[in-house]
Image: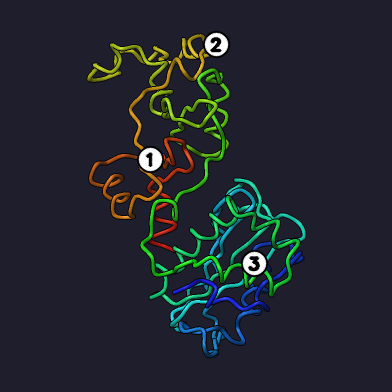
């Protein structure tokens, strides 16, 4: 089933003026509430969005400049979309950047997999197909015709590329550790890849690794700390890390999967193999990140 069959030209908007994500969601929900294209694309079904059943989610960061809002409602049996560029960028609630383009998805619980696949297509269109620029230059009809010609299947398998989060920052081997810790704190990340200038991953730095930098080796073997109450395990921490670079403290124990890895491979790697984070690669270069929070947000709760 093709994504273009579930969006009408009149559900594509340019320079939408909104002040917050609640208003953006409500406006796009109103736009599709009167009717949505059914699975065959040949008729219109009515969507009753009343009865206090709204379930607007916080926008999910998909790609630089883009976010998805999935409005999942129990009584809706199909899926429909609205696409909009925003007059002014809206900051993401989690503080990780702002969105200039938003994909609104209205679906029922049985279409969650299709919604997830649509979000993956949206990320690709933003990152590789110039969707933001096309929204500003093409008419609704022309943009819809372009989408129709792309064969954006919703019933295809969900892959790593569909659920990954784009890297939020870069850490190189010569990045000071003090800068690494600042970036990790800012983005609430407990692990970060160290890359070369071509985005090949050469190592990883974890919060646990940074924490242990200030702990003497014998400290890990102690059964109790009761007899050394005055000992400060971090007294040499800043001396040791003040001039250190990422390449000096990184490890090579990291996990990668190709962008076409299946969702089951991703879940198996995170759960059964107990890896905290997966770096998604294309031709050996990092293009995204998946951790357990991504699985919860984009699979279990999407």
In the foreground, 219 or 11: 11
Query: Percent position (x, y) of residue 144?
Result: 63, 72
Residue 277 numbered tag:
1
Residue 28 lies in what quarter of the image? bottom right
Query: Which circle's residue, 1 or 2, is located before the other in the chain?
Result: 2
Relative to 80, 277 lies left or right:
left
Q: Picture coordinates of residue 35 (x, y %)? A: 59, 86
Q: Residues within 10 Å of mark 1 (few under 14, many from 20)?
A: many
Q: Is residue 57 left or right of residue 139?
A: left
The percent coordinates of residue 125 (x first, y second) are 57, 57
Measured Cα–Cα span from mark 3 to mark 2? 45 Å
The residue closer to the viewer here, 287 or 236, is 287
Secondary structure state at the residue bearing disc 3: helix
Pointer 2 local density, CA inside 10 Å: few below 14, some 14–19, many at least 20: few
Q: Secondary structure at mark 1?
A: strand
User: Looking at the image, is mark 3 or mark 2 earlier in the sequence?
Assistant: 3
Q: Residue at x 42, y 16 (%)?
A: 214
The residue wearing badge 2 is 243
| Residue 82 lies in quadrant | bottom right
Between marks 1 and 2, how big is the CA–CA gap? 27 Å
Residue wearing tag 3 = 22
Question: Callout 2: helix, strand or loop?
Answer: loop
């Amino acid at each position: 089933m093709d994504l273009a069959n579930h969006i009408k030209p009149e559900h594509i908007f340019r320079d939408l003026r909104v002040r917050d994500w609640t208003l953006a969601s409500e406006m796009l929900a109103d736009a599709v509430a009167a009717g949505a294209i059914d699975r065959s694309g040949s008729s219109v079904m009515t969507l009753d969005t009343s009865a206090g059943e709204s379930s607007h989610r916080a926008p999910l960061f998909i790609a630089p400049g883009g976010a998805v809002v999935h409005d999942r409602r129990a009584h809706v049996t199909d899926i429909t979309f609205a696409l909009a560029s925003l007059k002014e960028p809206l900051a993401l609630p989690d503080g990780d950047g702002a969105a200039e383009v938003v994909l609104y998805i209205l679906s029922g619980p049985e279409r969650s997999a299709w919604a997830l696949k649509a979000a993956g297509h949206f990320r690709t269109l933003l990152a590789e197909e110039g969707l933001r620029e096309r929204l500003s230059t093409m008419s609704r009809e022309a943009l819809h015709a372009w989408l129709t010609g792309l064969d954006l299947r919703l019933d295809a398998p969900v892959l790593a590329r569909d659920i990954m989060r784009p890297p939020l920052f870069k850490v190189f081997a010569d990045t000071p550790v003090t800068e690494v810790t600042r970036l990790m704190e800012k983005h609430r990340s407990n692990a970060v890849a160290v890359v070369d200038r071509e985005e090949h991953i050469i190592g990883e730095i974890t919060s646990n690794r940074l924490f242990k930098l200030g702990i003497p080796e014998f400290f890990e073997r102690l059964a109790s700390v009761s007899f050394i109450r005055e000992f400060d395990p971090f007294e040499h921490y800043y001396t040791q890390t003040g001039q250190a670079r990422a390449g000096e403290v990184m490890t090579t124990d990291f996990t990668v999967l190709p962008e076409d890895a299946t969702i089951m491979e991703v879940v198996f790697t995170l759960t059964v193999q107990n890896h905290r984070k997966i770096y998604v690669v294309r031709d050996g270069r990092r293009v995204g990140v998946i951790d357990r929070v991504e699985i919860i947000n984009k699979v279990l709760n999407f």
